[in-house]
Amino acid sequence: MVVKIENLVKRYGDLVALDHFNLAIEEGEVFGLLGPNGSGKSTTINCLLSLLEFDKGKIEVFGQEMKPDSYELKKDIGVIMQNVAVFDELTVYENIDYFCGLYVKDKTERKKLVEEAINFVELSEFRKFYPKKLSGGLLRRLNIACGIAHKPKLIILDEPTVAVDPQSRNKILEGIQNLNANGATIIYTSHYMEEVEQICTRIAIMDKGKNIAIGTKDELKAMIDLGETISLEVLELSEESMTAIQGLPHVIKMTYENHLLKVKFSKGKHNLLRLLDLMKEREIGFGGVHAEMPTLNDVFLEITGKELRD
Amino acid sequence: MQHFWYQIKMMFRNPTGIFWAVVFPVILGGLFYFMFGNIGNAEQFSEIPVGIVEIQEDNMFVEILMQVETGDGISMFQTKTYKEKTEAEKALEADEVQGVILLDGGEIELVIKESSIRTSIIQTFVDQYLQNKKLIEETAMTHPERVMGLVENLNGEVQIQMTDIPLKGQDKDPYAQYFYALLAMACLIASSVGVQNGLAIQANLSPVGARRNVAPTKKMKQVLVDFAATLCIYCVLMTGVLAVLVFVYKQEFGSNVGLILLATWVGSFVGLAGGTMFSVVLKGSKSTKEGMSVVFFMVSSFLGGLQWGDITYILEKNCPIVNRINPATLMVNAFKSLSVFGDYRKYAVNLITLLLIGAIFLVISIVKLRRCRYASV
């Protein structure tokens, strides 16, 4: 077990930020903490890193209790904070070297690690740049390099792609998968469900400081009734036809807005065929057809009654 | 060593820190130089006019009063005798005399219009005289055979005491005090850098602080490396500031430049440690802590006599503890100990006190920081 959190409670005055939160992360996982802003993801990470004091609970990393002076444990942890944490007065190379130096004392080894980190985040041509001269995406990549240069076994990334352009985002996500492939266990927090779905092997969905669901993305999707959502472009649709569609087997919900018909089906076979047959039968003309499998947002919506994006 | 050099690089790449440490004191020193330059040359020590009203004659007191001289052989007091107290008081009111001494048998009373350096000299003399007189009388009662020897000793002591009065009268340049206070302020400006050091190690105040907190290097080590690096820079900067004051503004800091430099380095140590402590101990935002460091060096410098030279004498009279613990005053006194009195013991006492204050600030900072978890990040 790489990380074990038991009954973690953290209060900010009257606000309960973490409410008896539990978590167990195995070696080699890319573990996603997914939840809307304010759900407790960053608080969990900060408690895990012994930055925050908490009211109750126990945190273990690599089988040992995590404390502010757990220096041996800290050697194997790399952290990429939500806010970019670099010195404005140091260049790209110097920043990575500075932070790597807090972990690795040997100069030769550190030089090699810093070079590897620079190449990993593809900042070679910016090595002499000061942070203020870097774009948002490049700055995020520098932030990552500072956190992973010492080759940690556990890497914690707290919303590393906030305010990042799509190209840099893809590079960051690719990089995280490479780090995992090289043996690091990853904890990844985000409120972007697409990212979490894309890279995480297991996901915990958080809301109001609680772990409301945990599992692989397929396991999470299997927890809900929704099977698929079928969308059709329809020019006109009578009340009668709408009633007929609602009467089809497995239909959970149907909406028709701006010439777009959306039908949500529970799990079942031949839903699309049945719908298309009905359209043909009633001679209803339609354009594009699009079928969507449930997303993590649907999981969140069904469990909490609200959108993940809210 | 790697962090030490990076810290030094960061300091040099931050022009704001250097401006406050060097440019600001040099500009202010320039202003002092042009303001006081001519006045200083013109002003020489002059005798202090003292009114005497002998309700009952006290020849011995008057004789001693007239004999007192400064180290340069100038008479300390110029006496004017008045028959009536009211007449003397009129002279005092008209600033013809600085103080009126009423002699009534054994009783001596000093009347002054307002507190100043010159009235402090009169008061010091009167106190010393009364103390010695009492000592002689007591010895005459118990050991009459020792009286002569005692009187001889006390004569010498009166001279020593009077030449030892730490006032402008002894100083070649009466405005040197302002330059001493300016140099003290330059050292204490280090507190603003100390605050930045403190902010950069606290997870709840800076993202960099959070990153450094999760690293396996002990916080005490990180704090001390930052501190040592910035102190080294400050020592170099203060050497530069002192050089400008001595060579450009022609200020005299005594012949022992090494000890003056040492005092500025110790002063910078206190400033840095104070800033670090403010950033760690005080609650509030980053700007509150930065603001407090400015308040610290400005108030300390004011109490050390930067804006108003007489403040230290007023404090000495009414609240001497402030002068014993205020870093700027201790620095000014250390500079004076060398340049005015050549008193190495006083210099050492001031420096040791400063070192103790700085060490206390630093220890408090480290104790507060180590193994710390934050309420919010």
Image (cartoon, coloured by chain):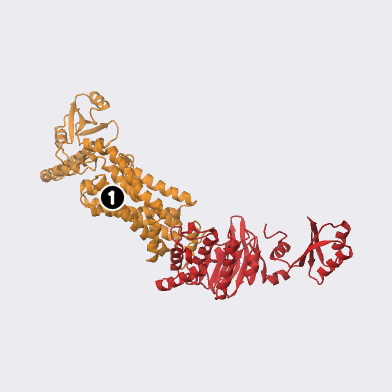
Chain colours: A red, B orange
Q: In the figure, B45 relative to A141: above or below?
A: above
Pointer 1 chain: B
Q: Position of residue B354 (x, y in %)?
A: 32, 53
Quadrant of res A54: bottom right
Q: Position of residue B270 (x, y in %)?
A: 35, 53
Residue at the disc numbered 1: B242
Residue in front for this viewpoint, B181 or A268: A268
Side (left or right) of B205 relative to B141: right
Side (left or right) of A280 relative to A219: right
Q: Position of residue B62 (x, y in %)?
A: 16, 33
Q: Position of residue A184 (x, y in %)?
A: 55, 74
Quadrant of res B133: top left
Local crowd size for mark 1, using a 10 Å CA cut-off: few (<14), some (14–19), many (≥20): many
Residue in front for this viewpoint, A52 or B199: B199
Quadrant of res B108: top left
Element type where label 1 sits in the image: helix
Answer whether residue A7 is visible to the viewer in this image: yes
Task: Name which residue type carries label 1.
Answer: Leu
In the picture, the quarter occupied by the N terminus of chain B is bottom left
Name the residue rendered at 51%, 72% in the picture.
Answer: A152
Q: In the figure, B257 relative to B319: above or below?
A: below
Name the residue rendered at 24%, 33% in the picture.
Answer: B109
Side (left or right) of A228 relative to B139: right
Residue in front for this viewpoint, A31 or A60: A31
